Structures are given as C-alpha cells and as structure tokens.
Image (cartoon, rainbow, N blue to C red):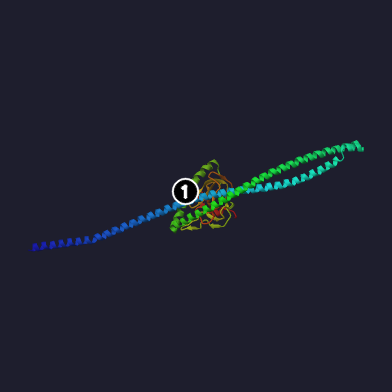
C-alpha cells in the first residue's frame, strides 16, 4: 500500500512539474516573440536611419558637385568680364590718345594753312614785281639778284608748305579711321561685357539656390561640424600634394621663405577682419587663417614672390590659390570668385593672382587667407604690415 501511495505521489508531482513547465512554456513563448519583434523593429529603424544618413550624405555630395560646377562657371564668366574690362580700359586710353593727337594735328593743319596763305600772298605780291619790270625800271644788278633769290625761296617754301599740309591731312584722315575702328571695338566689347554680366547674374542665382539647399541639408551643429572637419582634412591632403610639388620645384629653383619679412608683408586685400586667426569657428574647431571682408571682383595680390602649387576649387574653401615661398612657407588664398594664375606660374609680391568672391558656399564676399610653415598654420596677421 505504502509503495502504491508513494508511486501515486511521485506521479502527482511529476504531473504537476510537467503541467508547470507547460504553463511556463505557454507564457514564455509570446514574451520571447515580442522581444524578437522589438529587436527586429530596432534593426529596421537602424537600417532606415543609416539609409537616410547615406541618402543625405549623397545629396550633400551632389549639391557640392553642383556648387563646384556653378562656381567654376562663375569664375570663367568673371574672368571674361575682367578681360573685357581691361580691354575696354585699354581701348578708352587709345581713344583718348587718338583724340589728343587729332586735336594737335588740326591745330597743326590750321597753322600750315595760315602759313600757306601768307606764302601765296607774298608770292602774289612778288609776282607784281617781275624781273622784266625790274629791268625796265633800271634797278641795279645786285638788287635784281636779291629779288630773284627771294622769289625762288618763296616758291620752295610754298611747295614745302603744301607737302606738309598734305601729309598732315593724310595723317589726320588715318587717325580718324583708326578712331572709328577703336570706337567700334569699344562698343563691341561693351556689348560683350553686358552679356557676360547678365550671364554672371543668372549663374549667381543658380548658385544661391544650391547654397540654400546645402544649408537645409547641413542644418544641425553636428553635421556642420562634421562637414568642417572633412573640409579641413581635404585641405591637409591638398597641402601634402602641394608640398611634394613645392619640394620638386625648390630643387630646381631654391626660394628663401618668409622668415626675414615677418610683420612687413603687404596685405593680400585691404578690408576688415571678419574672422581672426584662432577665433571659434564651430564646436571645438578654430579658424586656422583669417577672413578679410572685401567687395566681389577686387584683386587678390600675392604677399611675396613664389610659385603657384595649387589653383583649383576645394570643397569648403571654393576657388583657392596656394603659393610656395620656399623653406616650407606657403600662403593660401580662398573663397575667390576667379583665379588669375595656374599651377606652375611664378608670381611676384603685389601681383594680382585672383578676384575676391564668395565661392565654397560663403554667404558674403571675402578672402580666406592662411600662412603655413612646414604644414603648421600660423597667425597670418603677425606676418602682415600695417593695413
């Protein structure tokens, strides 16, 4: 009996355990499924966020490509305007010179005409005293010879005056023809300049639309900071390339660097300092150079002789020129509207190398100016003299 009861108890316990286990499994299965569903949802959200970030990054990259294309186009148009303005200025000077020369020729012509009138009048009066009349009048031989010589010289002077007047008239006609040609060329250049200016305005409107879209994409501090950091890395990468090119150039033609001219170098452009070296830029980033405000189209000038080792559009800095001065010293000129020099060009101090602009997506026209020594940025203001 006891054995039967013991077996029964064991059967009941086993049944209870089995029932409990079944109940646990019954309740645990939905909970596990819920956790798995939640995990899958998190993974899907992460994937969606990553796709969104990737899509935004691709959109930003495409906008930057569009910006580069537009700003390079603006640079070409701006250079065409710069050339046209220079040619118009030269034509204006040529026209002014021609007009001055023509005024002088007209005065000369009037003088020659008066001289010719006087000679003709004298010759007419001399004709009233012909040699025959003088012979009949009984004048002596010496006096007759003097009258003859005088008549011959008067005739020669008249002939010379006529030749000079004809030469002056011909020269005046040539000057008038040249003036008409110059004025026609002047008008053609003015018409060309107006077309370039209209094109420039259209390109600027397109660029402004692209810049606005970029701002909408980089609309948080973190994204803007990341963009700035990436821009700085791009600059460092280009500096490395420029240093290699500069080293090769130095082996051919050594340069003496900037060290002896600290505090004496000319300003690349005159203007107020919008951002000073070392001032906060974004987050922990600080300005590695200085930004000088100036009107678009103003000339940017080299601070010291050297060789151009970079001249291209660089994301974040727009159209930039980098000049190697030797001994590891380089100067950087960014945000330009147009570049007037190319890689390999030798430049002198105060020589125009670019035109001030707002490329790289800047909001206002200015110049980004930086000096690096052996790749390390240094305060550019300490190298410049008084503005």
| Residue drawn at point x = 48 percent, y = 47 percent | 240
Left or right? Give the position of 105 relative to 195: right
**The N terminus lies in quadrant:** bottom left
Per the image, label 1 sits on a secondary structure element best described as helix
Q: Is residue 149 above or below residue 326?
A: above
Q: Residues within 10 Å of mark 1 (few under 14, many from 20)?
A: few
Left or right? Give the position of 45 relative to 285: left
| Residue drawn at point x = 22 percent, y = 61 percent | 26
Q: Nearer the viewer, residue 365 or 115?
A: 115
How many discs appear? 1
Task: Pinpoint residue 187: horizontal percent, then vertical percent.
Answer: 62, 49
Left or right? Give the position of 305 relative to 159: left
| Residue drawn at point x = 77 percent, y = 39 percent | 160
Task: Pinpoint residue 104: horizontal percent, then vertical percent.
Answer: 72, 47
Q: Nearer the viewer, residue 115 or 279?
A: 115
- The reply to whether residue 86 is in sight is no
- The reply to whether residue 4 is in sight is yes
Left or right? Give the position of 9 relative to 217: left
Q: Which residue is mark 1?
A: 237
Task: Pinpoint residue 17: horizontal percent, then vertical percent.
Answer: 17, 61
**For the view shown, which residue lies furthest in the right direction?**
138
Q: Nearer the viewer, residue 148 or 50?
A: 148
Task: Pinpoint residue 152: horizontal percent, then vertical percent.
Answer: 83, 37
**The C terminus lies in quadrant:** bottom right
């Amino acid at each position: 009996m006891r054995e039967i009861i013991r077996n029964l108890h064991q059967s009941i316990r086993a049944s209870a355990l089995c029932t409990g286990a079944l109940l646990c499994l019954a309740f645990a299965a939905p909970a596990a499924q819920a956790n798995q569903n939640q995990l899958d949802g998190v993974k899907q959200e992460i994937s969606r966020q990553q796709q969104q970030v990737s899509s935004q990054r691709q959109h930003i990259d495409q906008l930057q490509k569009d910006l580069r294309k537009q700003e390079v186009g603006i640079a070409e148009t701006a250079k065409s305007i710069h050339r046209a303005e220079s040619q118009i200025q030269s034509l204006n000077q040529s026209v002014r010179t021609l007009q001055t020369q023509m005024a002088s020729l007209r005065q000369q012509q009037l003088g020659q005409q008066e001289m010719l009138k006087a000679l003709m009048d004298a010759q007419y009066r001399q004709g009233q005293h012909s040699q025959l009349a003088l012979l009949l009048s009984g004048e002596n031989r010496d006096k007759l010879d003097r009258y003859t010589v005088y008549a011959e010289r008067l005739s020669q002077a008249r002939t010379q005056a006529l030749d000079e007047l004809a030469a002056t008239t011909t020269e005046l006609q040539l000057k008038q023809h040249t003036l008409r040609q110059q004025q026609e060329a002047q008008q053609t250049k003015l018409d060309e300049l107006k077309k370039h200016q209209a094109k420039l305005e259209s390109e600027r409107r397109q660029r402004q639309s692209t810049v606005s879209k970029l701002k909408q994409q980089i609309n948080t501090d973190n994204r803007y900071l990341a963009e700035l950091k990436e821009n700085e890395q791009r600059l460092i990468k280009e500096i490395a390339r420029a240093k290699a090119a500069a080293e090769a150039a130095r082996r051919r033609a050594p340069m003496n660097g900037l060290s002896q001219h600290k505090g004496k170098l000319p300003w690349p452009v005159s203007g107020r300092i919008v951002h000073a070296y070392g001032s906060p830029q974004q987050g922990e980033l600080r300005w590695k150079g200085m930004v000088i405000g100036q009107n678009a189209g103003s000339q940017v000038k080299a601070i010291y002789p050297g060789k151009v080792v970079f001249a291209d559009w660089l994301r974040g800095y727009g159209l930039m020129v980098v000049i190697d001065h030797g001994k590891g010293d380089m100067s950087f000129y960014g945000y330009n509207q147009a570049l007037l020099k190319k890689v390999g060009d030798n430049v002198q101090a105060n020589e125009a190398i670019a035109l001030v602009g707002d490329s790289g997506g800047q909001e206002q026209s200015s110049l980004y100016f930086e000096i690096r020594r052996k790749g390390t940025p240094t305060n550019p203001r300490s190298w410049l003299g008084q503005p």
